[in-house]
Image (tube, rainbow, N blue to C red):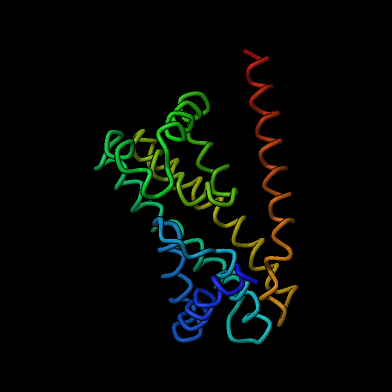
Amino acid sequence: MAIVEILAPIVHFIMSIISDLGYGGIFLLMVLESALIPIPSEIIMPYSGFLVTTGSLGSVGVILAGSLGNLVGSTAIYFLGIKLGRAFLIKYGKYIFFRPKHLVFTEELFRKYGEKIVFVGRLLPVVRTYVSLPAGIGRTNFFKFTVYTLAGSLIWNTILTYAGLQLGHNWRHIEQYSRYLDILAVIVIIAFAIWILYCIRKK
């Protein structure tokens, strides 16, 4: 119950923005979600999917609005990472729950496996919000960053929109189904780990 009470104002805010602005509201909220503002896509996109069932919005428009919003917000954080640099994140990252060890770990992944980390990160809850920052700090190739960010966002937002479509008027109970998203995330991680091991053995 405590979680529901905490989320209630956020849910109402999201519903109000999307109901008033439509695709523009989805775009705006997803820009904020990707710019380190704690507005969960796990609420934005399923609610938008529910609105598709009412005929208020179209599924393609919803997915594109959300994904382009992710791209814009992620790009802003990418360039913020370039501007602020590594030292700033080490000093102040704790205020956004990003610790130095997280940065070191992420940098090592980028160093070994390149920009593909951006794509995988976009498919993982929580990680998807932060991955653009170390990508910018490490000056990841911007074109590849853009392509992987958009590709990962399209997949993630399609899944969440579909969940909203299936849940219909019961979309508010998305938290009950979040474990399936977690399972999907674990599958992605396992597949990525297998690919890494394959590359290492091949070398």
Which residue is depicted at the point 25% across and 42% down?
84
On screen, 126 above or below 140? Answer: below
In front here: 71 or 190? 190
Relative to 12, 187 lies left or right: right
Which residue is depicted at the point 48% across and 47% down?
147
Which residue is depicted at the point 35% across and 46% down?
78
**Which image quarter holds the C terminus?**
top right
Give the residue furthest to the front: 2
Image coordinates of residue 37 in percent, x first then y, are 41, 61
Which residue is depicted at the point 47% across and 52% down?
129
Image coordinates of residue 200 in percent, x first then y, are 63, 17
Relative to 136, 150 lies left or right: right
Image coordinates of residue 50 in percent, x first then y, are 65, 78
In front here: 119 or 87? 87
Relative to 121, 76 lies left or right: left
On screen, 62 above or below 69? Answer: below
Give the residue furthest to the left: 83
Q: How many marks?
A: 0
In front here: 94 or 190? 94
